[in-house]
Each structure stands twice: as C-alpha cells, then as structure tokens.
Amino acid sequence: MSTLFSKIISGEIPSDKVWEDAHCIAFRDIHPVAPTHILVIPRTPLVNVADAGEGDEALLGHLLRVAGLVAKQEGLSDFRVVTNNGAGAGQSVFHLHLHVIGGRALQWPPG
Ligand code: DGP
C-alpha cells in the first residue's frame, strides 16, 4: 500500500532527513511531541510490526539500531523508541515507523 511516507522516500514530499541508507531513512516528525522527534522508516512499505514476516527480521533489527544511532547523533542518551500498531494504538500512517523521542523528561506509561 502506498502512503505519504512512500512519497517522502521518493522525495516527492520534502522532509528534514537525518539518516539515509540502503534499507531505511529517518526524518524529523512534522508534529514533534518533544525537542527531538524522529521517524525511522524502512524503504520497504511494511504496514506495521504485525505485517512483518520471518524474512523481515534483519530489517526490523536494523531499524532499531538506526533508532539508536540517530538518537546518539542528536546527542541523546535518554530517549524512547515506540511504534504504534493499528489505528486503535494511534497509528495514522500505515507504513511502519519507529518514533525516536527525546530531549525532555518522558512520562510512563504513555497514552
Ligand atoms: P503515527 O501516528 O504513529 O502513525 O505517526 C505518524 C507520524 O507521522 C505523526 O507523528 C506525524 C508524522 N507525519 C505525518 N505526516 C507527515 C509528513 O508529511 N511529514 C513528516 N515529517 N511527518 C509526518
């Protein structure tokens, strides 16, 4: 399924990109909920975590590693990585993405 994130990957929709490699890109969220709010998305249009199969394990691991790398790039040691799976959990764009959130004190539990 094509979403607006496919258009961000192709460059059709501009984004403030902070990471790019063969498997994923990361860019600043347009509606940040914290001083740092970055989305890490695979180039492959998986819908969400529940849509991932056995063959996606390396990709999922890579996304998590890139989340840590972009947080470090932002100078963060404390941060949150979260992904919303399904509309009822707050997913609004149906292309898998990890939110990397930090730069302020974070409460728990979320939402
Ligand atoms: P979620 O609600 O978990 O599906 O998160 C989707 C996020 O995507 C939300 O925090 C806002 C962000 N977003 C939506 N449209 C755009 C856009 O056009 N550009 C950027 N940079 N972020 C977007």
Image (cartoon, grey):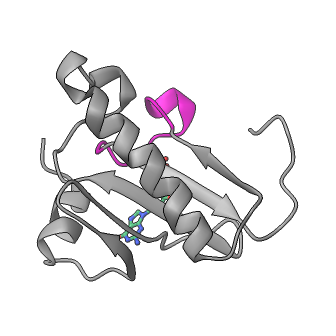
Task: Indicate the position of residue 15 as horizontal and vertical percent values.
Answer: 33, 80
Picture quarter with the C terminus: top right
* Chief SS of the magenta region: loop
Residue 31, compared with residue 15, is above or below; it is above
Point 31% across, 42% down: residue: 94
Report if residue 32 is visible in the image: yes
Residue 91, compared with residue 34, is above or below; it is above
Farthest top residue in view: 54
Point 28% across, 39% down: residue: 59
Task: Indicate the position of residue 51 as horizontal and vertical percent values.
Answer: 27, 24
Residue 88, compared with residue 59, is above or below; it is above
Region rendered in magenta: 84-95
Q: Is 4 displayed left or right of 92 in the figure? A: left
Report if residue 92 is visible in the image: no
Quarter of the view holding residue 39: bottom left
Residue 60, compared with residue 24, is above or below; it is above
Task: Indicate the position of residue 97 as horizontal and vertical percent values.
Answer: 40, 48
Picture quarter with the N terminus: top left
Indicate the quadrant of ligand 1 in the picture.
Answer: bottom left
Point 71% across, 68% down: residue: 76
Task: Indicate the position of residue 65 as horizontal and vertical percent values.
Answer: 46, 49
